[in-house]
Image (spheres, rainbow, N blue to C red):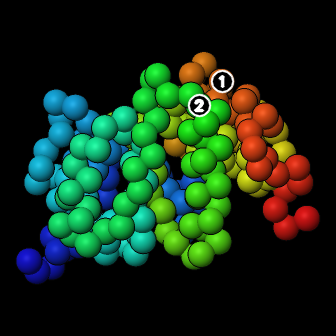
Amino acid sequence: MKGKWARGIPPRFFAWVIKGHLAVSERPGGYARNHRKVRRHEEILWLRSEGFTRVVSLLPSPHNLHAYDELGVIWSHIPFGPHDDPAVVLADLYVRIKEWLTDGETILVHQEELGDRLMGVLSGYLRWSGMVRSGPQAIAVVEKILGRQMGPAGRELVAMVPNLTGHATEPLGS
């Protein structure tokens, strides 16, 4: 491959939550019936060319993780399906994200699609880490970044953050 196609294409709804460090998108290749193998390949190439060091899949199943291996992209699978306990999953996920960011990694987090639940996960991280002081502030930040409103499913995840293990009590850098 030569030229711009060698670099791939960005995943749909890609956005930086923490510029240069933590990003979010829909699943590379698209979701469900819209998923395309060629598009997945192009999007993973783009992630690799942009310096992402880890892709975190929150899909309930291990679908397409082999595609990251084939293109030499490190991945972590932390299933977060509709029947998983959010308190358990988020406490584990947030600790891992903090460790990866501390180690200098550049991370993309995805679920099947970029919806309320994924918005809540990322807003929750901002609150859990202490980067923002309150749930409403974390929600507003992510809504502004993504250009869409968060519904009840995401807001519930943000509301549970103060009860999670390891929740920061002071903003980072204090």
Q: Residue at x 45, y 46 (%)?
A: 78
Tag 1 near tag 2, CB within 8 Å: yes
Looking at the image, residue 28 lies above or below residue 80: below
Q: Badge 1: few (under 14), some or many (20 or more) residues near its Cα, within 10 Å?
A: some
Q: Quadrant of the N terminus?
A: bottom left
Q: Please state the horizontal and vertical placement of residue 71, each as a whole percent of the image.
A: 21, 69
Q: Earlier in the sequence, mark 1 or mark 2?
A: 2
- Quarter in which the C terminus is drawn: bottom right
Q: Left or right of 81: which side holds 29?
A: left
Measured as percent of width and height from the top left, residue 43 is found at 25, 58
Looking at the image, which residue is at 50% across and 28% down? 84
Q: Which mark is residue 112?
A: none
* Kind of residue indicated by mark 2: Pro
Mark-to-mark CA distance, 1 and 2? 10 Å
Q: Secondary structure at mark 1?
A: helix
Whether residue 142 is visible, yes or no, is no
Label 2: how many Cα within 10 Å (few below 14, some 14–19, many 20+): some
Q: Quadrant of residue 131?
A: bottom right
Residue in front for this viewpoint, 122 or 66: 66
Q: Which mark is residue 156?
A: 1
Q: In the picture shown, does residue 168 fall above or below 155?
A: below
Relative to the observer, which residue lies in front, 160 or 172?
A: 160
